[in-house]
Image: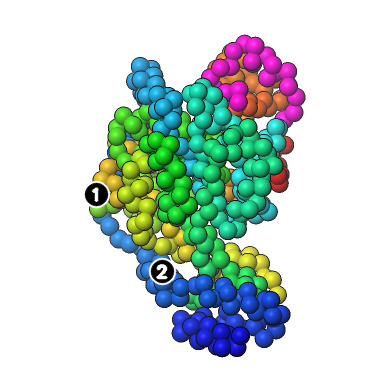
Amino acid sequence: MNTRYETLAKRAAAFGQEHVLRFYDSLSDDSKRRLLDQIEAIDFPAFAALADGAKRNAAVAGRIAPIEAIDATAYDAREKERLTEKGWELLRQGKVAAFVVAGGQGSRLGHEGPKGTFRIGLPSGKSLFQLQAERLLNLSGRAGRTIPWYVMTSADNDAETSRFFQSSGYFGYAPDDIRMVKQQSLPAIDEAGRMLLAARDEIGFAPSGNGDAFASLKRSGALADMKRRGIEWVFYYNVDNALIRIADPLFVGAAAHYGNPIATKAAYKTHPEEKVGVLCLKDGRPAVLEYSEVPERLLYEKDAAGRLVYGLGNLSIHLFRLDFIERHAERDIAYHAAHKKIKTVDGRGEPFTPDAPNGCKLETFIFDYFPLAERMTVLSFRREEEFAPVKNKEGEDSPRTACRLVLDLHRKWLAEAGAGPQPPDGRDIEISPLVSYAGEGLTPDVVKSLLERVPSCDGEGESG
Ligand code: UTP
């Protein structure tokens, strides 16, 4: 035991990580063993190289230019119909899969449990996962074929996510058509590059970013499963967008029509300083500039029509051609240091929850795959119909704003269906995705039955 301790202590020390053993002497035998097991499993040289790369990667320069986008809201009725039908054809043929990245820790939201289990405060009390499942079920029913659903989890939330799906009866999905894909985790570090302890006897690990998505599909066998099913397009999205139009037939059809390996749904930023990454060309290749990376002189630049030249916000709604994922699943992409509040221990080994960022998680980002495609289809959509992010506990991009956006959209659908001014009696009417995916099917009878229902949005996020 001692020899093992000494060997591992030496190994950690060689990489400036000896402090991970600083509470060792005070631990029980079991805890000692657990901690040594953890240290033994760490590939210190690889981790050091990766952390080093993340630091250097902070600001990679490049020639920035605007990227061309197609305004999907300006399609005429015939074109829209043609592309949508193309999408339906692919859905009917079973060539489209949904892939949600849900491995993040959601630290800003602060919900105990996987973010997908969070209920944003809709009258129905539905969780994010349930909203997504029902949209998929709606399309699957109409396509006559189930859209397989892949869910990326992490060590942090995999078991709980699986339990949630199980206890929800997979929302009516056949369990075989839902597959959890667990991503990898890496030690979190402080600003000096030292691994943070989650407890006296535990190194703190954090999921390695949504850029692990392709590698996780490959490692878990999910990629092979997609191939076996004949999937051609993978619809990728964030777990925390309450308005996500999963596998949107128009988007699928347009992506297939233009034929590039990647297609993305974008929407114009609401204001130049909005904290959202922007789509652009970097050294002639498709790329995303994080909001902090956009040079000031570009941030406010406008075109002749008065539109922000670098205003195409990345909404994390993408379609990847399966052959693109296959080709690049094992490719190394850059790690970034994401500065966050990370729970750790204080000098006495007691739990410590910081109120400001105290370290970083090492993460890869899915958009770092974009430059690997020579061309990418960028389609701009109406933001208020597509994007209701749930990031923060309060204020902007919170459960309250997301809930409002969902109910405002439903109100608009009802008005378009001829329901008259909304809401009657100040009530908000929620429309189940099983009834309508994007405002279709709201016949007078359906509208009447919806108007007869009761409660309103409480605006409060609930745990669920
Ligand atoms: P965010 O960057 O918003 O991170 O993730 P987060 O972890 O959810 O939240 P904060 O920053 O801690 O508050 C965008 C999307 O990428 C997924 C998230 O689950 C979310 O859908 N993600 C993020 C992963 O799947 N894995 C990761 O390692 C990180």
Q: Which residues are magenta?
A: 434-457
Image coordinates of residue 355 in percent, x first then y, are 63, 65
* Residue 157 on image: x %, y %: 61, 54
- Residue 364 in view here: yes
Looking at the image, which residue is at 68% across and 54% down?
112
Image quadrant in which you'd find residue 330:
bottom left
Residue annotated with mark 2: 50
Q: Is residue 45 magenta?
A: no
Helix, strand or loop: magenta stretch:
loop
Q: Residue at x 33, y 31 (%)?
A: 256
What amino acid is labelled 2 in the image?
Leu
The percent position of residue 123, horizontal first and vertical second, equals 71, 32
Asked whether 229 or 167 is in front, the reply is 229
Q: Residues within 10 Å of mark 2 (few under 14, many from 20)?
A: some
Assign a secondary structure to mark 2.
Answer: helix
In this orientation, which residue lies closer to the viewer: 137 or 253?
A: 137
Between disc 2 and disc 1, the foreground one is 2
Q: CA distance from mark 2 to mark 1?
A: 27 Å
Q: Which residue ends up furthest to the right in the rendered image?
A: 454
